[in-house]
Image (cartoon, rainbow, N blue to C red):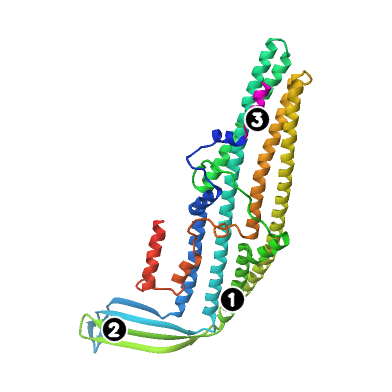
Amino acid sequence: MFGTMTRWLGAGVICAVVTAMPAPSKAETLADTLMEAYNHSGLLDQNRALLRAADEDVAAIVSELRPILNWSADVTRNFGRSRTSGIARPATETDMGVALTLDLLLYDFGQTRYRIDAAKESVLATRELLRSIEQQVLLRAVTAYLDVRRNGEFVALRENNLRLLRQELRAARDRFEVGEVTRTDVAQAEARLAEAQSGLAAAQGELQQAIEEFRTAVGRAPGNLRAPRATPDLTNTVAESRAIAVRNHPDMREAQHQVAAADLTILAAEAAMKPEIGLTGRAGLRESFDDDDFSRTGSFGVTVRGPIYQGGLLSSAKRRAMAQRDARRGNLHVVRHRISQDVGNAYAILRAARAVQQSSREQVRAARVAFQGVREEAKLGARTTLDVLNAEQSLLDAQTNLISADTDVLIAAYRVLASIGQLTAKDLNLNVQTYDPAAYYNLVKDAPVPISPQGEKLDRVLRALGKD
């Protein structure tokens, strides 16, 4: 009985995992999962669309510096009566008019330019937000991948343990029949088997939850997940990583661009209090349906206009912009400290996980030796069935702790990369077609009209996005 138990424990967890998880023809690596998560993510698609909307904000303001042409047309029926020299006559006529108007902003003390520059800073901030979202998507996929592996190995380990306990129970019953053990020994084996069945059911439930999380994060059910070959290369010290994160983390860069946009918004609010100079033109035609009367008119001129009193609106807009600037500066301060703290926390968690991993390996070694010793002593009658079951449970717990510790080390290592700002498809060298945030901006930044070559190219891009 005990020789069989040892062979089952020696078989290892990895072989048993195959029975607990789907096994397609090709093993799936972590890189495969990350590529699928990147391509599948609706969250990335959502924020890419928000970035394109921010790009269009620049185009909308740029268009204000272009000539603005409008047309209008009307058909008017005039009616009434008039009296001349005591003679009353109907006064009715129908005429039609068309007009073309032109407006062109010549100078506004930089207000529009400041607004364009602020919109550009907002675009850059939104790009960094997209990069931050990308890190979240990939970290979630990493965690989902490793949690499926962890829980799959838990299930395999508990299934293996359950088989051993069933053998132990059969052996205990056989020995009870010949009078070698008491009914208490059999009851202890039965209780431990019931406990193992409960543990297996719980592990299977946790595995199913991990599979559902994987399906959500990646877009499909997991296959035969291969163990990662190595942890990410983390050669920087904590201080070096803090410095890198403060310079390059997307959350930090986003906050910096938000401050720059707020500063430019204040300048635009100040310029809005000053006059603006514009060019206006108008051409019109009006003809009567009742006779041959017509008129053709046109005008061309320069206008200067500025605010005198608007109920405090402009001053309020400037104060609001200043308050937003102060809020974003405060946010920059908060983000800087949060990023520095996140780096420190990530390294602390990684160090703790590695220490637990090392201790768990020693625990497995010692528990295996103890189990083998108790087994041999039980053969000589120096140990009871309960002693053997307890030693076996200790070995199971140690193996479970090691599986969990190995997984925690990998997750912690990827969290370090995310805290630094280096958990992106580009940083990980994923074999995917990465999204170019500048491509759409370069098409729309000059506000092209649909009939222009650039506008036609933009239409093709939009159609392609719609098909995707």
In this view, the residue in front, 215 or 401, is 401
Badge 2 marks a residue whose secondary structure is strand
Distance from the alpha carbon under mark 3 to that under mark 2: 97 Å
From the image, state whether disc 3 or disc 2 is nearer to you: 3
Give the residue number, with chain letter if any, for mark 1.
264
What is the x, y in percent for residue 421?
62, 60
The amino acid marked with disc number 1 is Leu
Specify whether residue 87 is painted magenta. no
Which quarter shows the N terminus? top right
The amino acid marked with disc number 2 is Leu
Distance from the alpha carbon under mark 2 to that under mark 1: 44 Å
What is the x, y in percent for residue 184?
73, 16
The mark found on residue 412 in the picture is none
First-in-chain label (3 vs 2)? 3
**Which residue is at 60% across, 45% downward?**
146
Badge 3 marks a residue whose secondary structure is helix
Badge 1 marks a residue whose secondary structure is helix
**Which residue is at 37% across, 65% downward?**
460
Q: In the image, is residue 363 above or below residue 272?
A: above
The mark found on residue 9 in the picture is 3
From the image, state whether disc 2 or disc 1 is nearer to you: 1
First-in-chain label (3 vs 1)? 3
Q: Which residues are magenta?
A: 1-12
Would you identify the image quadrant in which residue 357 lies? Answer: top right
Q: Are marks 3 and 2 in contact (CB under 8 Å)?
A: no
Q: Residues within 10 Å of mark 2 (few under 14, many from 20)?
A: some
Magenta stretch, main secondary structure, is helix
Give the residue number, with chain letter if any, for mark 2.
285
